[in-house]
Amino acid sequence: MASRRRNFAAVAAVLLSIIAVCKGDLKSGASYVFGDSLVDSGNNNYLPTLSKADIRPNGIDFKASGGEPTGRFTNGRTIADISGELLGQRRYAPPFLAPNTSGSVLLDGVNYASGGGGILNATGKLFVNRLGMDIQVDYFNITRKQLDDLLGKAKAKEFLTKKSIFSITIGSNDFLNNYLLPVVSAGTRVAESPDNFINDLISNLKNQLTRLYTLDARKFVVANVGPIGCIPYQKTINNVAEDECVSLPNQLARQYNGQLRDLLAELNDNLPGAKFCLANVYDLVYELINNYEHYGFKTASKACCGNGGNYAGIVPCGPTSSMCDDRSDYVFWDPYHPSEASNLILAKYIVDGDTKYISPINLRQLLALDD
Ligand SMILES: *[C@@H]1O[C@H](CO)[C@@H](O)[C@H](O)[C@H]1NC(C)=O
Ligand SMILES: *[C@@H]1O[C@H](CO)[C@@H](O)[C@H](O)[C@H]1NC(C)=O
Ligand SMILES: *[C@@H]1O[C@H](CO)[C@@H](O)[C@H](O)[C@H]1NC(C)=O
């Protein structure tokens, strides 16, 4: 009886959502989020992996969980969470791998991102398990069919092409946890020039974005790779001064970012009806680091949560790490990831900023296109 009542409630919820979509009530749209630990909302909780954030004190400032860890690799909300909130979306896109991400929930967006994941399948092998971009697109293909079942083919297509934003934040791990690894990939680095490696990334990403297009994605926002030579981990292992960054990782990121800009311009020209926006995370994070005091931070070099070296940059954040007193004083939450305070600034620029940081149009304009 109870279970029949639950089924009825579930069916009613699906029907109400369908009615909302058909009436065009979902003005705020839905976000389908792809990427790595910068935007993972908990997929790795369901994987046997060494890349985990479902341990304290991660999530300590995440209001929706009362400060309990959720699998997000930061103290609070990710850039994806905050962007969705600024656009008026009804909930944070839930992890694809969560068993209750099903039925009408899919209409509010889904998160496929995975800590340790990269553009290349091999990236993140050292974590044993993670979802790379190819697999994330395979998973979206599963959601795609479920949306057809939920809405009918015509409505599903309209919902995806008009009301849905596809956000892709990927590439850092291809450099950090593949190309730049001293031991594991020494062979790769000797065998493959930076030019070839970056060409390989761009051609794989082109294929992944084109696959999403064939599945009716039209409104894309693709983040470039941040200044990975400035993260506490790189600064610690390379032992650079407080106001310095490590040059090779930043150089590789800039080279990749230049080619990414060209790729998105090419896709904008060649894929009819698609709009690809470039989120210039590199310049944004660089600006935060360079002018951290202007943005209200006290340090842009030390991790709030972590251990090791001058910048707490070796041991990832966990129950035995030291943690700073005021999280909002820190640009970096842990050796790799920005704090929620940073994410708030980044998301505001991406949603409502100008072409310096988000081009050719911002996320709010992207969502409103041919509405
Ligand atoms: C799924 O279940 C989890 C754990 O009970 C809960 O926190 C979350 O809000 C649920 N997600 C959705 C989309 O209902
Ligand atoms: C990566 O793995 C996926 C799924 O296993 C596979 O379909 C794809 O061809 C692989 N990509 C490359 C470049 O090897
Ligand atoms: C989606 O899945 C179907 C099979 O279920 C397959 O034929 C199709 O090629 C897939 N599309 C993409 C873009 O992977």
Image (cartoon, rainbow, N blue to C red):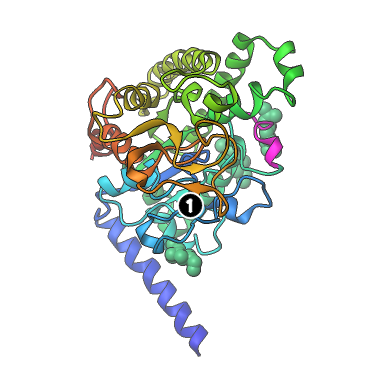
- The magenta stretch is 119-127
Q: Decide whether the magenta segment is chiefly helix, strand or loop.
A: loop
Question: 319 left or right of 33?
Answer: right
Q: Residue furthest bottom?
A: 1
Quarter of the view holding residue 185? top right
72 w.r.t. 103: above or below:
above
Disc tally is: 1
Quarter containing ligand 3?
top right
Looking at the picture, which amino acid does disc 1 mark?
A: Asn
Foreground: 94 or 79?
79
Say if 236 sits above or below 20 in the image.
above
Give 287 or 188, whichever is nearer the viewer.
287
Give the residue at mark 1. Answer: 58
Q: Position of residue 199 (x, y in %)?
A: 58, 14
The answer to whether 77 is drawn above or below residue 149 in the figure is: above
Q: Quadrant of residue 191?
A: top right
Crowdedness near tag 1: few (<14), some (14–19) or many (≥20) residues, C-alpha within 10 Å: many
Observer able to see residue 172: yes
Q: Which of the 4 quarters of the picture holds residue 107?
A: bottom left
Residue at the outermost right position:
187
Residue under the point 69% across and 31% down: 122
Percent x, y of residue 246: 52, 17
